[in-house]
Structure formats: C-alpha cells, structure tokens
Amino acid sequence: MHQSKSLTQFLEYQAAIRPGIVALEDKNSCLTFAEWFHQAESFAGFLAQQGIAPQSRVLIYLSNACCQGPLIFGALMAQCVFVVVSPDTKGRKLTEIVENCEPAALICDLLSAPKLSELAESTALLICTEDIGSIGTTKVTHLEQALLQSIPDDAIAQRPAPDSHLAALVYTSGSSGTPKGVAHTMASMRFSGVTISQYLELDQDSRIFSHLPLAFDYGLYQLLFSAITGAYLYIADGFTFPSTVADCLVEKHISVFPSVPTAMLVLSPLWAREFPLLKTITSTGENLPLATIKQLSQACPHAKVYKMYGLTECKRVSYLPPEKLLSKPESVGKAMKGTNTLLLDESLQPVKIGEPGKLYIQGPHLMQGYWRDPALTAQRLIKSPFNQQLMLDSGDYFTMDEERDLFFVGRGDAEFKIRGMRAHPAEIERCAQAYPGVEACAAIKVNSSVAGQEIVLLVQGGNDIDLRQLQLFCKKNMESHLVPRKIQRAETLPYTSNGKLDRRQLLSWLE
Amino acid sequence: MAVKDQIRTFILNNYLFTDDKASLKDEQSFLDSGIIDSIGVMEIVLYLETEFDIKVADADISPENLDSVNQITQFIDLKRDSLEV
C-alpha cells in the first residue's frame, strides 16, 4: 500500500489527517503538517508561475532549518529536482556544484546571496531568507513571499511527479577531487524512505531529534521519515555542547536519535544521564565501536540500537537487527527487505562464506546514475552476470557469515569517512594544491584521541610556504570537517610505479 | 604567560589558524561566531586538563563555562580555587 503513494502524497495525507500537529521544529520556529504542506504547495505554485520547468534543479543553500521541509517538498510538487548543499561548502567546490547542476532557482541566506548571484546563471531565480530587493541588477525574491503567497487552484500541476522522474541530486566527494551528483528518482527515494522507516518501526508517535546536516542523505531522510510516517522531527543545526543535545532530548520527549559514531563519541558525557523515552538509536557512516555500543546499551537499556551501512548511491544497504547487536557487534547486518547484496571476486563470481569479496547491491533503491557523468555511472552501475539487472559496485570489501550477515573488511580505493561523511583525499589535495608554492601534497587520515580520526596533510614544496597560511587557505576553501588538523612538510612524497601517490607507504611514515 | 593569553593563543592557533590577536575578542562567543564545533569543544577540554592540571567534569562542559576566552579563564580560576580549598 505504502509503495503506491508518492513522497508528496505522503505529506498531503499527513496534512489531511493530522493538520494541527507539529511536524517540524528548529530553535526558532515550528511547522504543523498542514503548514508544511501548504507552504510546499505555495512554493510549487511560485516555481510554476516563474516558469521553472519540471526537472529543473532547485538548489537549497541554507543551514538546517524547518523551512527546508516546504522547500524540498515544494520542489518535488513542481516536479523539480532538489539539491541541498551545506552552507559549509565553499570555494571551488561550490562553483563546481552550481556549474554541474545548473540550478534554475537558488535559495540562500543574506550572507551568501551575493556569492550565489555571482555563481548562478543570470536567468536563475534567486530567493533569499531576508527581504533584500535586489543585488546589482538581479532581482531577489523574499523567501516568505515564495512560501506564503496564496496561489490560484489551477496554477500548479499538483499531480505527483512520475516514479521515473528525478527527485534529488546528492553531491558527494569523488576520486577525481570534483564533486559528483548522485541522482535519485521519486521511486528510489520513496522505496528507501518507506523501507527504512518500516524496519525502524517509526510511526506518528515517533519523535526524532536530528543534528545531521540536511545536505547529508542521512539527515535528509529524517525529513522524509516525518512526511511518510507522521513522526515529529526536531532539526538541530549540528551541535557544539553535548549538554544542549541532552536538554533537547528531554524537553522535546525525543524517542528516536540518529547519529554517527564520531558524534556519539563526542556525546559520551550525555549517556551518564537517563533518557527513559529514547527508544531508537541509529548509527551509520562509520563503524560503531564496541565501547560505544556498551555505553549506549547501559545508558539506554530500553533503546534499540541499529547499526547500519550504506552509501549515497543506494542510500542504505544493510542494518543489524538490534537483538543481534551484542552477539555480532562487528557486523552491519544483512540487506534490507526487497534488496539484494552479492559478494563477488574479480571475475564477478560469488566468493565462499567467510571469504572477502567486493560488495555489489541490487534493488529499487539504486541511484539512477551520476548527474551528467555517464562514464562514471557505467563504472559503478554494471549489469549483473546472473540476472542482467543493474547492480551497484560499492567499492567496499566484506565477508559474509552463514546467516548472510556482512562484516566490513576494507575499501578498494583511498576514499575514507570523516565524521561519518564520505571524503576522498583527492578533494582535499586538489584544493590545497591551488595554494601558491605547493608542488604536491597528500591527505591522510590518522587516529586522534578526541575525534576518533582526523586529517593530516603532507606538503611538498618550497620552504617559504607558510603552513599556517596554507591551513587558513584550506579553512576558507573546504568544508570544516575536511580541513587538515595538522599540516607537515615532506621532502618528497612516495609514488607507486604508476605515478600515483603511494598511500600505504605514507601511512607507515606517520607511525 | 597569563592564563587568558594562553587560552587565546590556543584558540587562535588551532581554530582560527592565525597569530593575530585582533581576530578574537575575549568576550566573543564561540557559538555565535561558529569558531568551534563539538569536536573543538572536546579538544579544548583535553587541553585545559593537561595544561592547567584541572579535572573537567561532564557537567562542566557547557556554554556557561567554555563559550569564550573570558569564560574559560574564569572557569579555570574557579577550578583552581576549589582545588586549593
């Protein structure tokens, strides 16, 4: 039944049956389901009035806040493709994303309006959270007008977008150092949203607290869960002090807490307090360490802890049922219902139980491809030799036990996770190389006592490079989680016979 | 070096990547200016514990104690006073 409704119809349904119930809340405002739906309708009408064609990209460049709910669902109602970009994305990366997705409309705050009006095509519609009139010759629409204007009934096509239409582009880090847009359809997002909310047993009584960026798919799906199940969602804009999270969990009667292992480590003081209402804790992004698992099970004995694994290209791959957590703490569980995982060797033949193989994924949750990059898409989405259907090459190696539970072994390339988010060292290196005097550099991830892991940059180049200035340059041009915590000089960097950075040797240098 | 100068230098070096004292006012809120994230807070706690030989309890990790150079300085004074008693 669920799989027949489109994402926007879920919200319409919630608005009809529980209009006055608060759906979304942030530190400044809240929206009921009816307000969320009507503002989304208004935004869709506004986009249509402005002549924004279906499947045009709508780029949202805002900090986490309630208004993203109506913006995202309004874009979908107008059959557009939404692109949520973290306001922490800057410099060349932001330029490349804008150039790649060519947004027809951009939504930003006062601070970033001048920057975005410069980047965007002159024909793009610029919408700002404040009423600023115009920037130069560019007219700027006030967000309030786009969300709250009343629209004539026949002005918008309220028919839901077909399943095959694109719904979103989610940008992630690529091995070339340039961002790639993972394109998901209405159908793939609905499938993941519905399937995940079912296994997490979310319903209209669930109360979710999310500190995860909406630009990160893990954060974005919390919003979808709210529309699909009628759950309440508190949207925090990250967090700095653990105590503010604890206070919010108590004050807002939170029952569902999604997070990433790094954040859970930082939040460990939290678990000295009691949260009797907390029923569900979810973790993905990186491996949840056994010590954290034990801490959570002690602090919240009534909570179910879900260890999960996924990648943006198919949202979620697997989860470990909470009852298996203590008996198989190292596993990420098995494939979600309705999907399939395969562990294959180099000639695409299945490996034996217990032997490592590369993980391939099949199911309705797979991305449609990388936006405007057919070559890369063809590398990652390949035809299965068994049933001729597409399967996604995860790039990750796993073993599987008799119960088909997966155990992570390692990655095939240099990509790594930092604070639960995927990053490719090439992205950091390419950015740092733009600094005058840097001949070559290498970004590596090392263990740190506080954050679990942090990035160190080794730089080869003239001795006149001011490392402090270089770090400042990185801060200005990279998202904060990517900024190297330490920069060290290197005489020469090691290369393999193919002329690629020898990352294995680099790690041994630091030991 | 006075405690306040030490704290300011630590914040400037590690989060603003500069030696320029003018870029951080003593009363400036880290939260409001987005200087420090949650991991930064834990690093500051670790620094205070090792550098000033104090014990920072979980309950002490709050904006009231750690949100500016001035607040951290006062917090250290308070901690040291309580040690002497």
Image (cartoon, coloured by chain):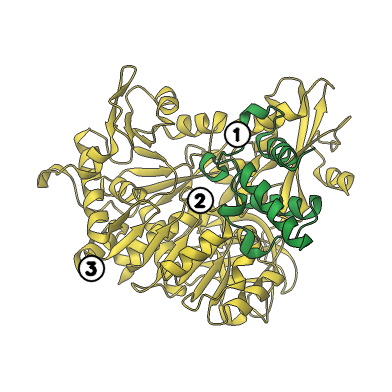
Chain colours: A yellow, B green
Which circle marks residue A54 in the picture?
none
- Viewer-nearest residue: A325 or A388: A325
Give the residue displayed 82% in from the left and 41% down from the top: A502
Is disc 3 in contact with disc 1, using a CB cutoff of under 8 Å? no
Residue A108: percent from left, percent from top: 39, 36
Quick check: can you spot residue A38? yes
Residue receiving disc 1 = B25
Amino acid carrying label 1: it is Lys
Q: From the viewer's perspective, is B68 left or right of A27?
A: right
Is disc 1 in contact with disc 2, using a CB cutoff of under 8 Å? no
Quick check: can you spot residue A431? no
Residue A12: percent from left, percent from top: 23, 60
Q: Nearer the viewer, mark 1 or mark 2?
A: 1
Residue A28: percent from left, percent from top: 36, 51
- Viewer-nearest residue: A359 or A241: A241
Residue A21: percent from left, percent from top: 26, 66
Q: Nearer the viewer, mark 3 or mark 2?
A: 3
Disc nearer the start of the sequence (3/2): 3
The secondary structure type at the circle numbered 3 is loop
Amino acid carrying label 3: it is Arg
Work out how far the residue at label 1 is from the one at label 2, CA to CA, in angstroms.
33 Å
**Crowdedness near tag 1: few (<14), some (14–19) or many (≥20) residues, C-alpha within 10 Å:** few
**Crowdedness near tag 3: few (<14), some (14–19) or many (≥20) residues, C-alpha within 10 Å:** some
Q: From the viewer's perspective, is A288 left or right of A63?
A: right
Provide the chain ID for the residue under circle 2: A
Residue receiving disc 3 = A18
Q: From the viewer's perspective, is A106 left or right of A497?
A: left
Residue farthest to the front, as pictured: B85
Amino acid carrying label 2: it is Phe
Provide the chain ID for the residue under circle 1: B
